Image (cartoon, helix red, strand yellow):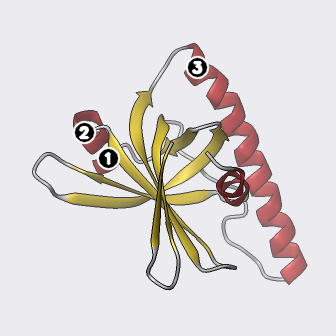
Amino acid sequence: MNKRIAELLKFREFVSVATCDFNGRPNAAPKFLLKIEDNVVYLVDYIIGTTFHNLSLNPKISISFMDTHSLVGYQLNGLVKIIESGPEYDLLVKDLLQREVDLSARRIVEGVTRGKAHEDFELNMSENFVIFKVKIEEIVEMVSSGILKREKV
């Protein structure tokens, strides 16, 4: 994955993901962005609902996000491996716990700085979750002029 996209994703907590079942019914949902390594993106699914079901049947996924400064949109298309247990899962859970603490701390500081009370400073994440390991195969850049740039990874 190119460095620009990795930099943009580094500061995000959530991205939108789109999946499709075998009947062609689409599903889009936000997922927690755990980390990025080379051409792999790790996402956390706390709901374990339609996205999980779709990816169990059809491992194709599309991740989308927007750079609001440049107004360039990005789509990362790839294949998912669902990780529910095992050594890789255990290592990723450690990363997840740290990301959750960092996000909670940042929310508390932002709330105090703005002088606004927030009902849920700390994240109340489900203990039941799976991790999606997404191998990125294609990057699509969408500029505001309507031009698409596709890059195979």
Q: Quadrant of residue 69?
A: bottom right
The CA span between labels 3 and 1 is: 22 Å
Residue indicated by mark 1: 49
Q: Is residue 80 visible?
A: yes
The residue sitting at 82% across, 56% down in the picture is 105
Q: Residue furthest right?
A: 113
The CA span between labels 1 and 2 is: 14 Å
The residue sitting at 14% across, 55% down in the picture is 24
Q: Is residue 41 above or below residue 65?
A: above
Of tags 1 and 2, the one toward the viewer is 2
Residue indicated by mark 3: 88
Q: Amino acid at mark 3?
A: Glu
Quarter of the N terminus within the rendering: top right
Considering only order in the chain, which callout, 1 or 3, is on the residue closer to the N terminus? Answer: 1
Of tags 3 and 1, the one toward the viewer is 3
Residue 135 placement (x, y as % from top left): 48, 36
Q: Amino acid at mark 2?
A: Asn
The residue sitting at 41% across, 43% down in the picture is 78
**Labels 3 & 1 near each other (Cβ < 8 A):** no
The residue sitting at 52% across, 15% down in the picture is 86
Please tell me how crowded label 3 is: few (under 14), some (14-19), or many (20+) other residues with Cα within 10 Å.
Answer: few
Q: Secondary structure at mark 1?
A: loop
Q: Is residue 129 visible?
A: no
Residue 121 placement (x, y as % from top left): 73, 63
